[in-house]
Image (cartoon, rainbow, N blue to C red):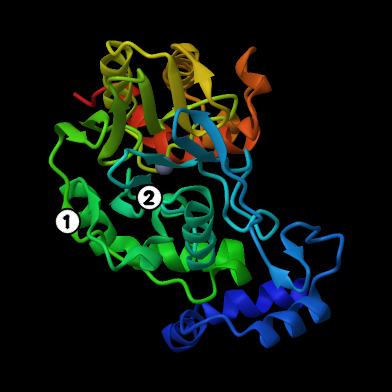
Amino acid sequence: MVSFLAESKSDMTSSGTAAIKRSGVDRRELLVLAAATVSSAALSPPLYAAGRWTYDLEPKEIDEGVYLLRGADEHLSTKNGGNIANIVFMETGEGVVLFDTGPSRLYGEELKQVIANTTDEPVIRVIVSHAHPDHYLGNQVFEDLPIESLAKVRDVIADIGDLFTDNMYRLVDVWMRGTRTVVPTKSLSPGRERIGRRELEFIALDGHSQADLALYDHGRRLLLAADLVFMDRAATTPHADLQNWQRSLDQLQQLPIDTLVPGHGPVTAGYRAIEQTRGYLSWLGETFRNAADQGLVEAEVNSLQIAAPFNELAVVQEEFIRSVSHLYGPIALDALDPIE
Ligand SMILES: [Zn+2]
């Protein structure tokens, strides 16, 4: 295991080797690597099964013609292959709308196969919700179609997408083989649009990241909230603006919602997931402001107790410490008395 990871990390220092890695999956090489360096306990089935790497994707129909591929409520790792985000595809009668493409080329390939096994409709729209790589690195498998996102999402992926991709290689390793950054090719216009039998609305928001797209089905009162909403799993904040995020949640809360698919975590009915996300973000902001008022340094904030009920969220301890590193510095600076 050690040599496996060490090899991947040293590879990341060289764009040449990274390019080789992206050139394709060499199955024999993977098998040799797996046998030499990964114990069966480290990567248990079904991720490495029947002599091949697989995400073993199983679509679940969560609403009429709407299928969810549920990500693990974990951090990115070699164990889950980066499969931590919820990916959704929906039939419209005219073709499939795909909402996010997953964390790697391999995932994208399996996703494409799953869609073909599930429905006779061809994929007609490929939508990327936001510029976080666990949501869009399957793009290259769908390059024969326009890949659509908000303009800002395109800009961010064009600017720093390769850094995200390299980071994914470091964290997820062999699962990323053959994966490269594919920038969305088409800017999506927010607003209502009839696609087949569905009256859909593309809603442009922000706050979780620089630009966050939600997709709402008016007929089904179904919201695909992407990472604006987390359920039973602590929110991630690397590019968050807490105020804007809360404002976006206010806007989503105006919609009549029967079914909500969060970016991470289980599907829920009604507004529970929005309220939970709002509660956690409020607690996070308040905790940081109180800590800043007391003059705490980051290391001290890291060791603060996580209040109930948020202490029961998946991966909350790790996400809290990450949020301290993302968000606490500016809040602590703001709290300093101005020098006269
Ligand atoms: Zn995200």
- Location of residue 65 with respect to 52 vertically, above or below: above
Classed neighbour count for the residue bearing mark 2: other residues with Cα under 10 Å, few (<14), some (14–19), many (≥20): some
Q: Quadrant of residue 45?
A: bottom right
Q: Is mark 1 within 8 Å of ligand 1?
A: no
Q: Secondary structure at mark 1?
A: strand
Q: Give x and y (percent) for residue 50.
A: 78, 69
Residue 229 place in picture, x, y as percent: 43, 27
**What's the distance in space between the residues labelled 1 and 2, CA to CA?**
22 Å
Residue 184 or 118: which is nearer the viewer? 118
Report the disc number at residue 186.
1
Q: Residues within 10 Å of mark 1 (few under 14, many from 20)?
A: some
Query: Left or right: 205 with respect to 273?
Result: left
The residue to which callout 2 is attached is 121
Q: Residue at x 47, y 81 (%)?
A: 18
Q: Nearer the viewer, residue 88 or 231?
A: 88
Q: Amino acid at mark 2?
A: Glu
Q: Earlier in the sequence, mark 1 or mark 2?
A: 2
Tell which quarter ligand 1 is in: top left
User: Which quadrant holds the C terminus?
Assistant: top left
Residues 129 and 161: in front is 129
Residue at 48% in and 22% down: 284
Q: Nearer the viewer, mark 1 or mark 2?
A: 2
Task: Indicate left or right for 176 with 270 as reference.
Answer: right
Which residue appears at 22% of the width and 60% of the height? 146
CB contact under 8 Å: marks 1 and 2: no
Q: Position of residue 260 (x, y in %)?
A: 44, 22
Number of numbered markers: 2
- Mark number, residue 335: none
Image coordinates for residue 320, horizontal then vertical, percent: 56, 32
